[in-house]
Amino acid sequence: MRVLVCVKRVPAVAGRIVLTPDARATDTRHLGFTISPHEECAVEEAVRLVEAHGGESVVLTLGPAAAVEQLRDAMALGVSRAIHLQTADEDWDAESTAAAIVEAIRSDEASAGPFDLVLLGNEAADAGGYQVAVRLGRALGRPTVTAVKGIQVDDGAARCEQEASGGRDVYRLPMPAVVAVLEGLNVPRFPSVPGRLRAKSKPVVTSSPTRPAQRLELIRLVVPQGHAKQAEILGHGPDSAPAVVAVLDSLGVL
């Protein structure tokens, strides 16, 4: 089988987020870059499916020249080859992103045959638009399901599970299909040193799509205010015991 997995280069924002002076972008001078946890699981699932069923896995990204780093990371985990839709540093809206990916998919499929599955993270870690997977599925005319926490492939179909209150919803999609997955679908492996060495020689096909006029306009970004932590001193020594008891009683633990 053939599996395509789409990823996006995003800032690793485990620390404090700082905006540029115009409040239109994240200041990334002191940040590393990665892909989102959802996409890490999508890459892992693509590798597992090909290991189980044979075939080829391909990783694709739309992003700047530096995004080849994320493509190499995916290939170090076992992905066969990469497609890089190289752009300048400006952001692309979901509609333009999906259109460029659709064009790349059709071009690759014209020579190598259809992808049985196109896997994506449920949403990117930075924009969180939740749109690209659905737009891909509609443009390609393929069944699509999002928020997937379980995938099984057999008899030309993908059995996809979503978590629901009281259980799971199950969808059986005839392939080819588009599936957006959530973190927790699997436990992603870590790249090995031999894997990283092999990734350096794996092919990356690069092209530069034309950025169309954007349908969405970015006005500004706002960093959400954090919740300040407070500590209250109830007393010192034995005299503080009644205050402690009163707090525990108010919390309902006595």
Image (cartoon, helix red, strand yellow):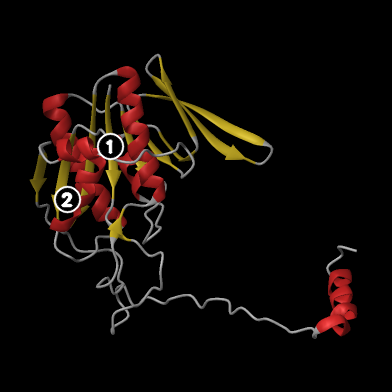
Q: Is residue 186 above or below residue 112?
A: below
Task: Residue 239 in the image: state x and y as whole percent.
Answer: 88, 84
Dot 1: within a 10 Å radius of its alpha carbon, few (fewer than 14), some, or many (20 or more) residues? many
Mark 2 to mark 1 CA distance (whole Å):
14 Å
Mark 1 element type: loop
- Identify the residue shown where x is 29% and y is 38%: 5
Task: Residue 225 in the image: state x and y as whole percent.
Answer: 51, 78
Mark 2 element type: helix
Task: Residue 120 in the image: state x and y as whole percent.
Answer: 35, 42
Of pointers 2 and 1, the one earlier in the residue sequence: 2
- Identify the residue shown where x is 35% and y is 25%: 49
Residue 164 appears in which quarter of the rendering? top right
Of 195 and 102, which appears nearest the observer?
195
Of 250 and 161, which appears nearest the observer?
250
Q: Is residue 26 above or below residue 214?
A: below
The residue indicated by pointer 1 is 77
Report whether 208 appears left or right of 232: left
Quarter in which the C terminus is drawn: bottom right
- Identify the residue shown where x is 9% and y is 46%: 206
Q: Residue furthest top?
A: 155
Inspect this view and state whether residue 134 appears: no
Quarter in which the N terminus is drawn: top left
Q: Is residue 186 above or below residue 66?
A: above
- Identify the residue shown where x is 90% and y is 79%: 242
- Number of numbered discs present? 2
The residue indicated by pointer 2 is 68
Of 42 and 163, which appears nearest the observer?
42
> What amino acid type is highlighted by mark number 2?
Val
